[in-house]
Amino acid sequence: MSIPTTPRSKTSFNPVTPTTKRTAATHIVQSSPHYTTTRRHSLYGVEDRVVIDPGSRVWKVGFSGEGRPREVFYATEGASSLWTLRRAADAAERAEEDRMLEVKMEKCLRSVFHDSLLTDPKARKVIIVEHPLLPIYTKDTLARVLFENLQVPSVSFASSHLLSLLAVGRITGLVLDCGYLESVALPIFASRPLFPQIQTTPLAGSRLHSHLRSLLLLFGTYLPPTSPGPVNIPTASRSMRVPPEILTDSILDELLTRCCFVGEPLLSVSSNDTRDVTPGLDEGSETDLPPSSDATQSESDFSHVGRDSNVSSAQASTSDFSVISDPRTPVGADPRAGGLQGLANLYTRHSTATDLRLRVAPLPGGGGLGYATLIIPGWVRERAAEILFEPGDVDEKSVAEVILDALLKVPLDLRKTMASSILVVGGTPMLPGFIIRLHSELLRAIQPSPFVPRHPVRPDKPPPPQYDRYASLRPLTPYFAIVNNPSPGEPHSDRAKNNAGKAPAFTPATMAWVGASLAGVLKTGGVEVSREKWDEVEPMGGEDSAMGDMSTSTPSQSFHADRDSLHQRNILPDWTRIPLPTGVPSAVTRVGA
Amino acid sequence: MPAPSILYHCPCLSTSPVPPPPHLPSSSYSFHPLHTLFFCEECDAVRCNRCVSVEVSGYYCPNCLFEVPSASVRAEKNRCARNCFMCPNCRNTLSVVPSDPPDPGDGRLMVPISAVGEPPFLLYCNYCRWDSSEVGMTFEKPTGLAAQLQKFEDSALDSLEFDRLKEHFEPIIRASSLSSSTLPTQAAHSPHTNPITAAATAALARDIPGVAKYTPLTRSQRGHKDKSANKDEMPQYKSRVDITTASKHGTGGGELDVEMMKRLEDVSEIARLEQRWSLSWTTSIETRDLKPLRIPLHSKRSKRCPACTHILIKPEQKAQSVRFKIKLAAASYLPAIVVALPHRQQALAVESAKRSMVKSTTAPPDEDREGKCELQAGKTYPFNLALSNPLYDPIQVRLSVQRMHVSHSEGAPDKARRPPFAISLPTSPFTISAFAEAWEYEEDDEMFGLDDDEVLEARLRGEKEIKTKPKSVGVLEKKGNTTVIGGEVVIGKEARGNVKFNMLVSFTYRSDDPSPSESNDMGSPSKAGSKVTETKTFAFYTVVDLGAIIPKEEAKYIDDIL
């Protein structure tokens, strides 16, 4: 018995690996070679496929062959995302969750065909932009609604990371997709996604949402609408802590997309401290008030601040600017808040961003007329996204670390290629300055961390060498390049110069959609599942029907049972379902042989 | 939907015909208001908007009501190709206005040169005063603006770049498909190969990452220092406009954008996400750069039964018409049911009377009304169901309440088995008179009218029931094609949540080809039962929501206030 001596890391490139490229190639062989000539002549263009990029929050839909999606919409009504990273453990609860998901998906998909695209679903093939970590039950639900409710002729799933690469004219690169639920880095070589090297972190849009919310609850200011009457209360005495109910998902979205941006890393700012001697804006001196000044008006329960803020804040604050910077948490009572205050002071000192006022709908029943005002401190606008870049831990890496970890797993001779063709896509990188910051964070994370003297474990042994996770990546430093970096700095190598900022100026958020549209017009893309194939495996044929039986012992249970049987369907292609390469036989069999 | 309400079940979402228990949040999607439902005569089934298959029977612009032929719909990207535009700021319809006539300088008003006004023409928003000259958009003619704009759209940066990408990839894909198709034919020339070995050689020849190609030529080439420069045998794509260039013009999230955001004084200067998220090309994020939007077309839809593909509803072709050629609405097949809570109506009446008499009430009026109108735990309330018959024949209706679901409150596991409320409804069938035009009804058949044989019979039967049951349960009133049924709900002491229950309504109606002699006997249930051949029965589920239960403690609190 000859044992293959191929090293382990290379077996993952076994030809069994699902490559969209090859399936696409076989598909092309079978399909008509005349498509390039015929497609322009079709009057109704039925062979243009419907391209759907179903995010957990935002969906982008359109036709293949077009440069931009026809419509973009929120798929969520009320809830913050269609699905989450966790599922209920209880079977009945999970079945209920699945039903809700199906109901919502059905609504979205039907509106895609009937309201957005105004097209007949039975005549259109569909390309689904598929995130590599899209939960399989979600994918099943999507396919079930498309095939059974809308009866589309075929559905193909294509990896979002690969499609994004197509949109920048490449088939090799390291793609970071920073979406709402997760940020996922996936290296792709010659259009083959290297799925075993995928790296993910939950630091993404949803975390940014909750971080911004807590920052605003602590440091934002809320001005209720003026009450009718002759007495004009000064702004300062009206201002109060932001009520949590004001910060709805849509308001947070608006704040993130219209007010927030990503500033430079603080280290570089503080290194040239000469700059912020002139704070530029007049409130700079007032914001640096020592925290002790608000000891007079410290309130223990800030949930009820709104009721009596007219009295209390009128005592202490003189200008509304000082109120903004007052977290009004009793100093020392909450060490966490104290730390936050320190951070706030630090950021405030280094931020020249202006404070912004946003008109928001007031609390119901709060009295007063017109809109309320939300004041967002400038440093919050600039530093809210800091949460995504702070060095994380094993479970929650920062977005820079997630890229570096993926690089660590990539085979040695691909590292340089990958490091110099990083592509950043997704909704969160739409923040101005995000990609620039990510580049500098990459360089910062790769630097050796400052030396921390460690005590030797045993006195007779020398202290253990410092843990240096990215030491092996350090030679790559001059080669790092983000291909869609809008403002690449001075390149340190020819490679970086050739790649950084050379991608076409598609927005990061729509890149996967554009790539899918391109794949559709090139008749390539993921594996196609036809409706006939789906119907063949259809599990429900002779479903037992307890028709109108009022005395069914537990109607809910039978209901759950037949829903569960629907999930037993494995015809959808997914990389997680590919059998593992055989590789080296296990030691046990070798001994036995 | 405000309680009390009733919704009709469509079984499309689940495989079983029994509706899901009403306490599940997902169950609300299986129930619909009657007026949104369809009825398929072929399948004898209710169909809802979630399951019907929809076809477009015509496109039209909602603004100018122009019917767009489907051939040009695609070319125009589902937008109106005439003069219809939306304001980018407020989504109001824009109007075309001429510019001011040139000032002759002598102070006199000049006569307009033409009837339409002076070019250049602008798009102007009557609501927010936006006009298209702000983005440098003016028109020579006041008509066919979309066609004039088409030039700009075709040369949009995203579509140009897209075409370039397509040209970049097409030869590569063609080459790869060619090589894979020619490979076996080449192999066939050599005598000792079969397709399997050919495939194996092809697999071996493939460049495996991490393994250098075992050919002396490539080896010598790879002696070059930067050997991994271009690993995928693909020419590098050169962007038409790359992101660096684009961001130097202030777009694309570059340093210019960051600087602008830093100095931002007013949020309204930045465009909302919804205004820019469908633009795939990086554009300025500022509000002042937004372009007018062409109005999206609407479609007239016909809907078919998903099972038998018979048409359920089909509109008239003309965009101006609001009529339908075919319309199989469930409301013309199933009895309409209206739920009412008599105690609430009384309370409302009393309260309004009280309010008109005594202006200064000590108790806050809101809580007063709640205390009277809401369902309190541990009490018994009557409710009414008014059923109206849409058919031209009388029907026999039978109501039954689906077995109550077990309470899902986690707080009381010992009482979890007990249903939070009990519903009593008349179990025997009752009749509803045939639908007739309004003038055909008698004026005086109000409470158990004695003028009609049918009603008399029903009344006798109803009185029999009334002997054993309290007055509130049973047939309360018959008027025209409407019969009012009284029911009662007993709410448990620990009950919470909503009084919401599934109710099966089964009705027997005369089938399409009746023998004329039988038509008079339809009213009596015993005879209808014996003549099964002429009648058909249809059953459907509904969910009745009587409103929220006020738990014990809160109820006490309200009582104290009163």
Image (tube, helix red, strand yellow):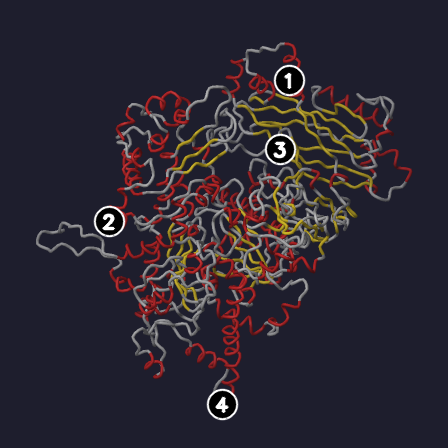
Which residue carries the number 1 mark? B347
Of residues B138 and A379, the one drawn nearer to the viewer in this rendering: B138
Q: Is residue A18 above or below residue B445?
A: below
Image quadrant where one finds the C terminus of chain A: bottom left
Determine the chain carrying the residue at label 1.
B
| Gap in angstroms between the C-alphas marked 3 and 2 | 61 Å
Q: Which residue is tagged 3?
A: B1
Q: Are marks 3 and 2 in contact (CB under 8 Å)?
A: no
Verify CB contact (< 8 Å) between mark 4 and mark 1: no
Given this view, does label 2 or label 1 mark the residue nearer the observer? 2
Judging from the image, mark 3 belongs to the subunit labelled: B
Q: Which residue is mark 2?
A: A271
Q: Under tag 2, what secondary structure?
A: helix
State which mark lies toward you, 3 or 2.
Answer: 2
Compared to residue A313, the image places residue B228 above or below, namely: below
Residue B250 percent location from the top left of the image: 44, 53
Residue A343 in view: yes
Distance from Cα at disc 4 to Cα at disc 1: 98 Å
Residue farthest to the front, as pictured: B106
Give the residue type at disc 4: Pro
